[in-house]
Image: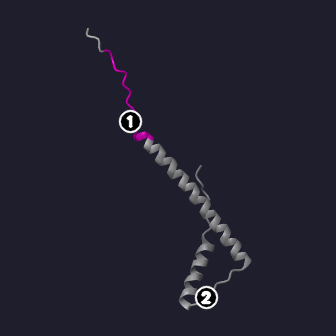
Amino acid sequence: MPLKTKIQTRPIEDILGRIRTLRQKGDKEIRLSAKEADQLADSLSQVMTRLVHVQDEIIDALKTAQQASTINVEMDGGDFNKK
């Protein structure tokens, strides 16, 4: 079942931008408000959930492709009596 909803990545993008700024300024720490932390946690949870779903789809597709490329040959030995 494909997931159709768009992942809210804005909180992740925001924190990455703040980290870039932190590095440029040489600051030693970054602080998040409780609201920002909640939004970041929700966004990361969505990303992780989607990643697991996509990983499962890839594994299933690989299994299907492997099964499709397997050729089974059955031999019954035939009848070796001369006729």
Q: Residue at x 34, y 20 (%)?
A: 77
**Image quadrant of residue 21?**
bottom right
User: For the point 58% across and 52% down, which residue is it?
Assistant: 2
User: Mark 2: which amino acid?
Assistant: Lys
Residue at 57 percent of width and 80 percent of height: 17
Is residue 61 positioned above or below 13 on the image?
A: above
Q: Is residue 28 magenta?
A: no
Residue at 60% across / 69% down in the picture?
9
Q: Which residues are magenta?
A: 67-79
Kindly state the secondary structure of the residue where label 2 is placed. loop
Pointer 2 local density, CA inside 10 Å: few below 14, some 14–19, many at least 20: few
Q: Quadrant of residue 41?
A: bottom right
Q: Secondary structure at mark 1?
A: loop
Which residue is under mark 2? 28
| Disc ID at residue 71 | 1
Q: Position of residue 8 (x, y in %)?
A: 62, 67
- Outermost top residue: 83
Q: Which mark is residue 18?
A: none
Residue type beneath disc 1: Ile
